[in-house]
Every structure is written in structure tokens, then in C-alpha cells.
Image: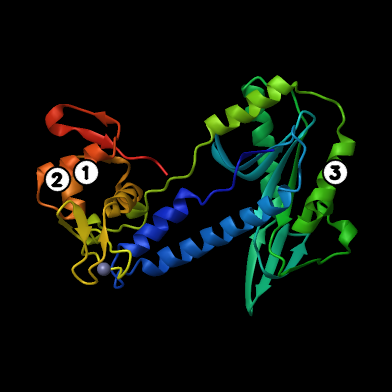
Amino acid sequence: MIIKEAQKPRKIKKLEVLLLRTPESLPQRDILNSMLNRELAGYEGELQLQYYLNFLTEKDYHLLHHIRLKDDNGYFQMDAILVTKFYILIMDSKYWTGHITIDNHFKQYIQLNKGVTQVYSDPVLQISLQEKRLKRWLKKMKYPTLPVKSLVVFTNRNVHLETQTPPNNYPFLNRVIKTPELIMKIDNFHHMYQMEILTNKELNKLTKTLCIKNVPEDPDYLSILDISPNIIIKGIRCEHCHMYAMKRYKGKWYCPHCKNRSSTAHHTTLQEYSFLYGNKITNKQLRNFLLIGSTSVAHKLLSSMDLPQTGPKQRTIYHLPIN
Ligand SMILES: [Zn+2]
């Protein structure tokens, strides 16, 4: 049973908006593009993982995708967790391509892809740390001690894995798999762990707590990449011709370039605003971003969206939905 689906991470939406709303000449665009590609590959891997995990139909198998928890050392993120009454399984997706050689001696993975070599530290070491942190987190939250297992799952079918030493010398061999093996592996865990540790009620409570305590990553790219808010392109983008030129005319949005009309174009623009500056907006900030002069039109737009409000009447802060 899926409790939390793999969804397009906020990080990706933020990077996409930044690329839409910054000029081509911005030097940081190369970094933005490579960050976006890396995040998209990670997300694709999680979707692949989800595709295979969908074959688990057991009602008391609770699946949660993309969970990030806080502990005393900071945050730790898990691509997917399977919570059962018997054990917990953490899965880390690697959407790597090319040829991967596992170097057991130095605990590193050497990737050769399109003539480029890259070296990564052994992902099993990282997921083992996540195991420890999750166990400690469960203890702190006063849950019974459940076995916590983990797997590194290579989710891209265009990857060729091999070990440098004779395979049996690599101690983590049974913790690294490719996606087609996943369900069989989970069946094995099912046979290995038959002692019911959580009641149904505890299982439901635990997965609910994991969802509540999940803190999605929400980086402030403007400050991280030192991008001045002044260069952000303002205005309402026309869905048809992609010009940032829509004007308010007789209660609707109108594009002077392609004559396209819309009554809801400001919704997308305000969502983009929230990815750039956060979810709080005033009447003045809205006029400034949507490039409209009239306070009363701005007020009408904000009121029509039925947003939660705080602050005094003259300086009302509207709270945009968080996506
Ligand atoms: Zn247009």
C-alpha cells in the first residue's frame, strides 16, 4: 500500500522556474542546468523504484517515497522506505549509467560513462549510516526495536555492474541489486523476518509520524548561487507564445503578441513567485511581480484565490499554497 508517492521534488520545480525566469546571459545558468539534470536523473530513478514497488500488493506493507528526517546530526534522506510489522527496508536509488566497477579495497565505485571516469564512495557505506540514524530516530520516538535493512538499487537498465575482486570478496554484494531483482529480495526478507513486532495500530501510527516528520529539502537557490533578485524576469508568461507580456484587460489576461486570453494565468505566475521568494506575498509584491499598477485589481486577484491571511489590514500578508 502506497502511503506517500514519489512526487516531483520542490528542488526540481524551483530550478525549472529559475531557468524560465532568468536571462540567457546569466553566468549561473550552466550550474542551474547541471543541477537540474542531476535532480531529474535522481527523480527518474525514484520513479523506476516506484514502478517495481507497485507490484507489492500486501495491505500491511506501507511504502513511503522520498522521506527526509531530522536528527541530532542534521537531516538524512531516504529514497523509499518499506515499513512492515516485521522489519523496515530502506532503499537508495542510483540512476547511474555506463560501466561501474566496484573497488572493494578502497570502498569506491568507479563509473566509466561515454569516456568519462567518475569515482564515488561506496553507496552501501552511506545507506548503512542511514540505517543507524533511522534506528536511533525510531528509538527516540519510542517505537519497538525493529530490524532495519537496506538496499542500494541500481534503477537504470543501462548500467553494467562488476566487482574488481572475485565477487565473493565484496562483503556488501547482497545489498546491491538492480531493480528487476527488488521484489524477489523483498520476498526473501518476508521469509527471514516473521516475528510480528508492531501491531496494526503501531504500524499506522509509525507511517503517519514519518509523513508528519518529513521535511522536504527547500534550498534558497538565489542566495546559494548568488543570483540577484533584480534580474528575475517579471510579468505573466503567455502559455502560447511564451512572452512575459500578458496584460489585464476587461477582467481577463490578454497577450498583445498572439492575442491569447486567459482568466487564470496569474495562478501559475504566483506559484512561480512562491518557488522564487517563498509563499508569503503582499498586495505591493504582487503588483510588482505581475506588473500591474492597480491596487484594487491586485486586491481582487488575491481575494478571489481565497488565501489564508495574516497581519494588519493595510499590510495584509497572503499565504500562497506550498507545492
Ligand atoms: Zn502570447
Residue 130, placed above or below residue 177:
above
Under circle 2, the secondary element is helix
- Judged left or right of residue 192, residue 124 is left
- List the residue tagged with mark 1: 301
Under circle 3, the secondary element is helix
- List the residue tagged with mark 3: 187
Q: Are marks 1 and 2 in contact (CB under 8 Å)?
A: yes
Type of the residue with mark 1: Leu
> Which residue is drawn at the image coordinates 57% and 62% (left, top)?
41
Look at discs 3 and 1 and give the one toward the viewer. 1
Type of the residue with mark 2: Val
- List the residue tagged with mark 2: 297
Type of the residue with mark 3: Asp
Q: Are marks 2 and 3 in contact (CB under 8 Å)?
A: no
- Judged left or right of residue 279, residue 70 is right
Q: Quadrant of ligand 1?
A: bottom left
Residue 71: in sight, yes or no? no
- Judged left or right of residue 151, residue 93 is left
Label 1 neighbourhood size at 10 Å, few (<14), some (14-19), many (20+)? Answer: some
Q: Position of residue 146 (x, y in %)?
A: 76, 28
As measured in the structure, the alpha-carbon distance from the residue carrying label 2 to the one carrying label 3 is 60 Å
> Which residue is drawn at the image coordinates 64% and 65% (left, top)?
119
Q: Quadrant of residue 310?
A: top left
Residue 229, placed above or below residue 68:
below
As measured in the structure, the alpha-carbon distance from the residue carrying label 3 to the one carrying label 1 is 54 Å
